[in-house]
Amino acid sequence: MNKKILVVAAHPDDELLGVGATIVHHIKSNDKCFALILGEGITSRYGKRDLADVSNIEDLHKDTLKAAKVIGYEKVYFENFPDNRFDSIDLLDVVKIVEKYIEEVKPDIIYTHHSGDLNVDHRKTYEAVLTASRPIESYCVKEIYSFETVSSSEWNFEYINSFKPNYFVDVTFTLDKKLNSVSFYKSEMRNFPHPRSIENLEVTAKKWGSVIGTKYAEAFEVVRIIK
């Protein structure tokens, strides 16, 4: 049976970095895939949020939609939480937003950030997803997976809560679409050896591929599976 997939991400480009090739894999299986991006992105690069150029946010969201078209997302939803300032917002406010989109999409599977990422927005997103998708009443979310986000997951050196994948997807035939799509994020991608570079995304996929005996793979932690 075809499934509905929801990626809950903190920032524009997070919906691709750790899960983009897997989403293409889902789409090839006729699953319907959606993305929810909670933060507006980019404003943390200014001294104060109210000094940010709104047109830069609009351009970033245009890049998101271009990338989504390459991947094949059915729809991308944008919210407007402050970039890298999710810890200034009551968790309940974030939970309510995630609940709203779970109710609208009714996903079978959610992919979201790892709980131990260095980025505070990622951690708060993970917490909000778990709270919003708790299995009560007529719940729809049967599977939750957390993905790594290069330039965040690997920069938290606390071993206890580091990213330790136990679920892998062979993306040998779908990685190219992911790499093509992230290239639209001109303001977010960097040159190698920065981890958020095209070259490093391929290297990372090769690393996880070598773990399972394939050319490329994306890796996840299983948070919950209900059968």
Image: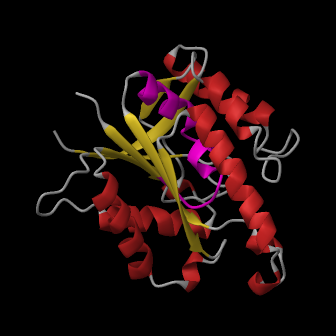
Between 211 and 30, the one nearer to me in the picture: 30
The reply, left or right, for residue 75 in relation to residue 105 is right
Q: Quadrant of the C terminus?
A: top left
Q: In this view, does 10 lie above or below 196?
A: below
Labels in figure, total: 0
Q: Position of residue 201 (x, y in %)?
A: 71, 34
The reply, left or right, for residue 22 in relation to residue 189 is left
Q: Where is residue 221 in the image (x, y as percent from the top left)?
A: 43, 43
The picture quadrant where one finds residue 67 is top right
Q: Residue at x 79, y 68 (%)?
A: 55
Q: Where is residue 30 in the image (x, y as percent from the top left)?
A: 37, 26
Q: In this view, does 64 lie above or below 206?
A: below
- Is residue 56 visible in this depiction of the protein? yes
Q: Quadrant of the N terminus?
A: top left
- Is residue 151 visible in this depiction of the protein? no
The reply, left or right, for residue 227 in relation to residue 110 is left
Residue farthest left in this picture: 137
Write down the region rendered in magenta: 8-28
Q: Residue at x 61, y 15 (%)?
A: 215
Q: Residue at x 57, y 47 (%)?
A: 15
Q: Is residue 21 above or below residue 193?
A: above
Between 197 and 180, the one nearer to me in the picture: 180
Q: Which colour scheme is used?
A: secondary structure
Q: Where is residue 171 in the image (x, y as percent from the top left)?
A: 54, 22
The reply, left or right, for residue 101 in relation to residue 220 is left
Q: Which residue is drawn at 43% across and 40% down?
A: 33
Whether 70 is among the magenta residues is no
Whether 21 is among the magenta residues is yes
Prevailing SS of the magenta stretch = helix
